[in-house]
Amino acid sequence: MSHTFDPNELYNRVVHYYIDKKGYSKEQANEIARKVVEREKSRYTCKNVSCGHGMYDHIRHSETCLVLDCDCRQFVS
């Protein structure tokens, strides 16, 4: 996967989709986009209590953490 997670890009795409395609108000679209970005951020963050780094900080997105002072050996979803 060569594309990294960009929360700003996702937020903008979701807002424009709900405003342009679904006809939602700007406030409703912003609230939906905020929830979507929060959910996606949590998917890309290691749930190991001692780690908490992103998926892209792990070898092959699932193995040992690449951060030098981190002891995490497995990405926990």
Image (cartoon, grey):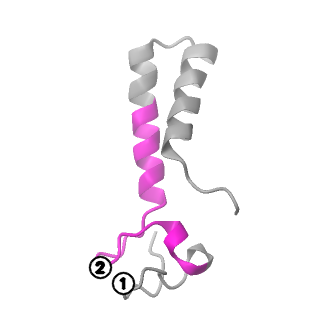
Pointer 2: what residue?
50
Which residue is at the front of the view, 24 or 8?
8
Q: Which residues are magenta?
A: 33-59
Q: Are marks 1 and 2 in contact (CB under 8 Å)?
A: yes
Report the residue at 29% width, 79% height from top: 50
Label placed on residue 70:
1
Q: Does 59 appear above or below 47? A: below
User: Does residue 73 appear to the left or right of 13 in the view shown?
Assistant: left
* N-terminal label among 1 and 2: 2
Q: Quadrant of residue 27?
A: top left
Name the element at disc 2: loop
Badge count: 2
Whether 43 is among the magenta residues is: yes
Q: Position of residue 56 (x, y in %)?
A: 54, 68
Q: Position of residue 11 (x, y in %)?
A: 50, 35
Report the residue at 70% width, 61% height from top: 2
* Distance in Å between CA atoms under marks 1 and 2: 8 Å
In this view, the residue farthest toward the front is 68
Q: Nearer the viewer, mark 1 or mark 2?
A: 1
Which residue is at the front of the view, 44 or 9?
9
Q: Amino acid at mark 2?
A: Ser
Name the element at disc 1: loop
